[in-house]
Amino acid sequence: MSSFEAPKGTYDLIPPDSDTFNAVREALSAPLRRAGYGYIETPAFEHTGLFSRGVGESTDIVTKEMYAFTTKGGTDLALRPEGTASVLRAALQANLHRLGNLPVKLWYSGSYYRYERPQAGRYRQFSQVGAEAIGAEDPVLDAELIILAVDAYRSLGLRNFRLLLNSLGDQECRPAYRAALQDFLRGLDLDEDTRRRVDINPLRVLDDKREAVQKQLVGAPMMRDHLCEACKSYHEQVRELLTAAGADFEDDPKLVRGLDYYTRTTFEFVHDGLGSQSAVGGGGRYDGLSEMIGGPSLPSVGWALGVDRTVLALKAEGVELTPPARPDVFAVPLGDEARRVLFGAVTELRRAGVRADFAFGGKGLKNAMKSANRSGARFALVAGERDLAEGAVQLKDLGSGDQGPVALDALTTTIKEKLQ
Ligand code: ATP
Ligand code: MG
């Protein structure tokens, strides 16, 4: 114990859990890399205004959850609460939309920060893998991203996740729907906060988790009954493409992302083994976002998958990921001369691609062999003065217990042969 602990809502990633996290990040991004998405990394903090505009003044993320601060130089910055605004900002800044083919396809992986009430599956620093396809309006692109996420979860061995799908309409049909929904909501018995939400962001009310609110929403107008022909046809194409790819989904007419620039396709992945923090990932089309942050019109679609919750979902299903490779060889030197020689041998083995570790700290034979066994290595490499005098080391198979001398100058080739 030191005098400090990790701040509330955060946790350290330590072995072997850290290996699971890396394996999950790897698996979530592998389908993207195969599909032509390029890796992008942006700063952990941005100008606060990017998020208040890009995420939205009326969202909980901006009003309640943002880590915003003023620097000594007087600049307003915020730790990034999500990835989309930053990635779009970076793509615009680098002119990616003018230099190459559209859509610009990007993926990212990193930590995000929200001042939330910490609980299982909800942290103040959490990890996401995300993808954005910028500058194209094509139902195939929406379907591509959703299928890549489905395939990513499946590749991990995850089974009990569900894909919820909805369309939020566009500038054409949403305003009339929004007004109809507001009319309906204003007739309900709602608290002051929610009534304010009805004014600024009525779609979000559909997403309210409270029973007392949900009960009153029976009979509320649904976007899907108000879609214009173009949105209806677009959504139908996405649905058909998903069905053809074997990506099962459930239509969820109440699924919203609730911001004006989110348009058409919206989706969420939920896992039933996670209690109330059931969303493992989500995304959608955001055709108006670029203009909101001062860019040209660039219809785009993206998603973000939560790494922490995906790890919890794997645990809930009892899925074990392949543990990291153990050392092939563990060197046990007996005496100073052996330390020098075996360390040289270990270095040579590593350079030849063999996983090798070493008994550090001048341990005696018994403790060093304990370390070798604990490491899970296949072979121990033991050498004392007598072995070295004969230009040999002892190679012990830690599984069978078989042991025999190997000439020092043939060590790397011998071990590589045995490992084949
Ligand atoms: P929720 O409804 O659970 O708050 P959200 O809608 O805020 O989720 P998004 O902004 O869509 O989440 O982020 C995408 C994913 O990132 C979520 O599906 C979830 O897996 C993960 N995520 C979001 N917030 C947190 C958090 N505080 N801790 C851990 N994971 C999170
Ligand atoms: Mg949230």
Image (cartoon, grey):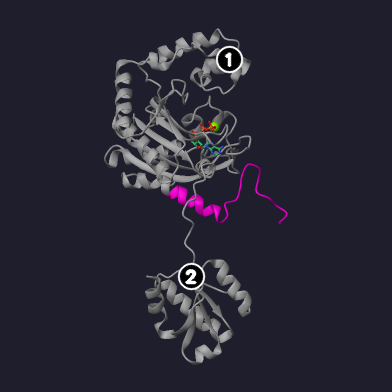
Image height of 224 relative to 103, above or below: above
Say if the magenta span includes residue 24. yes
Q: Residue 162 bears which disc, if any? A: none
Q: Residue 195 bears which disc, if any? A: 1
Q: Quadrant of the C terminus?
A: bottom left
Residue highlighted by disc 2 = 378
**Residue 61 relative to residue 349: left or right:** right
The residue that appears at 33% across and 20% down in the rendered structure is: 231
Can residue 137 be spotted in the picture?
no
- Towards the viewer: 261 or 181: 181
| Residue furthest bottom in the image | 389
Q: Disc 2 and disc 1: Cα gap in Å?
A: 66 Å
Q: Which span of residues is magenta-colored?
A: 1-26
The residue that appears at 52% across and 18% down in the rendered structure is: 200
| Residue furthest left in the image | 101
Label 2 CB-ligand 1 distance < 8 A: no
Label 1 CB-ligand 2 distance < 8 A: no
The residue that appears at 61% across and 47% down in the rendered structure is: 11
Q: Which quarter of the figure has residue 416?
A: bottom left
Q: Which three-letter amino acid code belongs to the residue tagged 1? A: Arg
**Residue 161 relative to residue 241: left or right:** right
The image position of residue 116, as x and y in percent, is: 61, 35
Say if the magenta span includes residue 264. no
Main SS, magenta residues = loop
Q: Which three-letter amino acid code belongs to the residue tagged 2? A: Arg
The image position of residue 5, as x and y in percent, is: 68, 50
CA neighbours of label 2 inside 10 A, class few (<14), some (14 to 19), many (20+)? some
**Residue 156 relative to residue 200: left or right:** left
Image height of 272 relative to 225, above or below: below
- Towards the viewer: 22 or 160: 160
